[in-house]
Image (cartoon, rainbow, N blue to C red):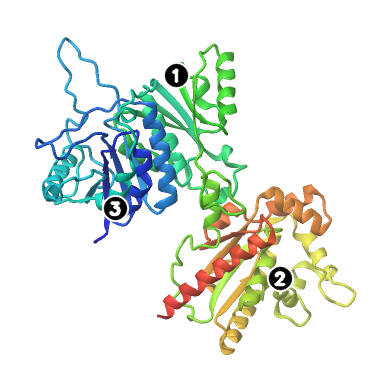
């Protein structure tokens, strides 16, 4: 069957049985939809009654909250490639009548536009008579068109063939199916905070349940610069503007009637401790103490405490040895290591072979160890630190230039340049440092080109230019791709102190004289990190190497 870009799944089973059906339904839907899957809930919807059904308000009950959690958990497990979004426009208590007139029981006065227009509607509705299939599909398409703006000529698919066996196993007594649902307490103003990097199932659970709880206003605090400093792989966190835009799009789809306020979080509290209208804060077991701290601050400000509504953490079925048990953004960021984050812009001025990788990273990042691993895998390693030593040797072209500028006092007794003495002359003096690099860097670049040409003559396929100053020196035009190694600053300081026997202050000064990793990452096609055990780094490098081989094959093809 043909694949659709965006689908809308209309779930009609009773709330008590839906949790058992979610995984197979999502699995079936994922065979037909490849990008976005919206989920519309209408338990008990009958598509064979003979009259065209209309959407109705579904009251918020505890079972709905449980179902949403289960749905996003199953989605992460069985169809992680899909952007699944549970739509909640029709989930609220029946609006009260005003002025004695009955309020229409219709959540969609006009069809709701969605960020992605559906081109197929799916349902778990179980068809008892196969001859009614066409009638049910027409009924489903009209029902969906009444609720949402869909693409013209939307298709419809009944997922019942894959679900018949499950239906037969649902033998719960009817009395159990009709238990009175426990109502869910809702609030006019709800607040939640988080990083919301690379919006995933756990975020969507948090946001969706917050939308269930909120009747009028939903306030979101989104971590900004100051709150990101301790995050794992913080260099890979999406920009604040991107995270906010994705939140806005998701919430506009999920519950457009809510007034959404998104504010930057520069501390753990922000508006939650000063807004008198807020009634509820949504937390997890992990963040409950943070919610309690918010209430302590509100008490100091003479404000009433917020109701702490706790949700479950979602388990990550695909985690590896360095990832958290829960679904988390840090785990998703770690999975990006070694992958192509940004496609190469193209280097028509470079010969296609050898394919040249520029490998860089700050002091202590483990760049050289990664370069050696790539060498073992088959790359020609061009060590720019060694080339830097060569250009300072007596007889080299820049030897005389350096002497002319910095004087003979930088020489050792054997007439070689004492690089420590030279370094002391330029340290802290940007003008003198630039004068030195203007002499040395072009000479190193010439040697790099010579090494690449030699590799080409030898028929080698990949070269790795191991260069701490790859970006600062402007050597990007020598390479096809830039690979950057990152580690947290505190880890780099520890490594530099242990390796070079210097003080913490000197180690920090050395790092501050280099480009920060956040700046380097902006130029990166591939990012790696040596933060964890060497075995983890080896796996990253091997993944990056294997993906590189596939890219090279494509360019050759």
Label 3 Cα neighbours within 10 Å, binned few <14 / some 14-19 / many ≥20: some
Instruction: Give whichever of discs 2 and 3 has the lower sequence position.
Output: 3
For image coordinates 69% across by 61% down, the residue present is 534
The part of the image, by quadrant, that contains residue 357 is: bottom right
> CA separation, marks 2 and 1?
60 Å
Instruction: Give whichever of discs 1 and 3 has the lower sequence position.
Output: 3
Rendered image: mark on residue 279? 1
User: Can you tell which of label 1 and label 3 is closer to the viewer?
Assistant: 3
Up-down relation of residue 99 to residue 515 (above or below): above
For image coordinates 62% across by 42% down, the residue present is 230
The part of the image, by quadrant, that contains residue 294 is: top right
Label 1 Cα neighbours within 10 Å, binned few <14 / some 14-19 / many ≥20: some
For image coordinates 64% across by 62% down, the residue present is 537
Up-down relation of residue 426 to residue 489 (above or below): below
Note whether residue 390 is visible.
yes
Residue under label 2: 385
Residue under label 3: 162
User: Can you tell which of label 2 and label 3 is closer to the viewer?
Assistant: 3
> CA separation, marks 2 and 3?
62 Å
- Tags 2 and 1 touching, CB below 8 Å: no
Q: Nearer the viewer, residue 152 or 102?
A: 102
Of the 4 image quadrants, the one containing the N terminus is bottom left
Residue 373, image x, y percentages = 66, 71
């Amino acid at each position: 069957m043909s694949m659709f870009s965006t689908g809308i799944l209309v779930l009609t089973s009773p709330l008590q049985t839906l949790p058992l059906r979610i995984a197979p339904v999502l699995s079936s839907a994922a065979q037909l939809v490849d990008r976005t899957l919206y989920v519309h809930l209408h338990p008990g919807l009958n598509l064979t009654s003979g009259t065209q059904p209309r959407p109705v308000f579904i009251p918020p009950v505890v079972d709905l909250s449980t179902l949403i959690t289960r749905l996003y958990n199953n989605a992460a497990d069985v169809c992680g490639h899909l952007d699944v979004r549970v739509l909640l426009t029709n989930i609220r208590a029946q609006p009260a009548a005003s002025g004695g007139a009955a309020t229409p029981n219709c959540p969609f006065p006009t069809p709701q536009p969605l960020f992605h227009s559906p081109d197929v509607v799916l349902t778990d509705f179980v068809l008892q008579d196969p001859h009614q299939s066409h009638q049910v599909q027409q009924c489903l398409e009209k029902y969906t068109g009444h609720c949402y703006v869909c693409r013209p000529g939307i298709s419809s698919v009944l997922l019942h063939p894959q679900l018949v066996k499950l239906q037969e196993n649902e033998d719960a007594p009817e009395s159990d199916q009709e238990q009175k649902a426990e109502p869910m307490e809702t609030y006019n103003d709800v607040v939640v905070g988080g990083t919301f990097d690379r919006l995933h199932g756990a975020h969507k659970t948090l946001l969706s349940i917050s939308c269930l709880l909120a009747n009028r206003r939903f306030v979101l605090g989104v971590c900004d610069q100051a709150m990101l400093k301790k995050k794992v792989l913080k260099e890979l966190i999406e920009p604040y503007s991107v995270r906010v835009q994705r939140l806005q799009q998701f919430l506009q789809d999920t519950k457009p009637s809510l007034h959404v306020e998104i504010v930057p979080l520069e501390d753990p509290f922000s508006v939650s401790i000063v807004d008198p209208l807020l009634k509820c804060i949504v937390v997890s077991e992990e963040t409950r103490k943070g919610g309690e701290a918010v209430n302590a601050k509100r008490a100091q400000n003479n404000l009433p405490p917020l109701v702490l509504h706790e949700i479950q953490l979602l388990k990550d079925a695909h985690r590896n040895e360095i990832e958290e048990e829960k679904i988390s953004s840090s785990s998703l960021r770690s999975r990006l290591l070694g992958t192509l984050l940004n496609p190469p812009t193209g280097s028509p001025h470079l010969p296609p072979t050898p394919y040249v990788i520029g490998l860089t990273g700050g002091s202590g990042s483990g760049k050289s160890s990664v370069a050696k691993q790539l060498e073992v895998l088959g790359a020609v390693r061009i060590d720019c630190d060694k080339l830097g030593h060569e250009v300072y040797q007596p007889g080299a072209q820049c030897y005389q230039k350096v002497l002319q500028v910095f004087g003979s006092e930088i020489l050792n007794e054997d007439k070689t340049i004492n690089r420590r003495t030279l370094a002391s002359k330029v340290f802290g003096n940007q003008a003198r440092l630039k004068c030195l690099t203007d002499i040395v860097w072009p000479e190193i670049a010439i040697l790099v080109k010579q090494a690449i040409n030699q590799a080409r003559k030898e028929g080698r396929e990949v070269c790795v230019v191991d260069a701490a100053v790859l970006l600062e020196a402007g050597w990007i035009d020598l390479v096809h791709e830039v690979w950057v190694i990152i580690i947290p600053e505190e880890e780099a300081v520890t490594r530099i102190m242990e390796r070079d026997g210097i003080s913490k202050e000197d180690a920090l000064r050395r790092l501050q004289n280099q480009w920060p990793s956040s700046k380097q990452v902006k130029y990166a096609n591939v990012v790696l990190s040596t933060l964890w055990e060497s075995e983890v780094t080896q796996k990253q490098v091997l993944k990056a190497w294997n993906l590189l081989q596939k890219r090279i094959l494509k360019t050759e093809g």
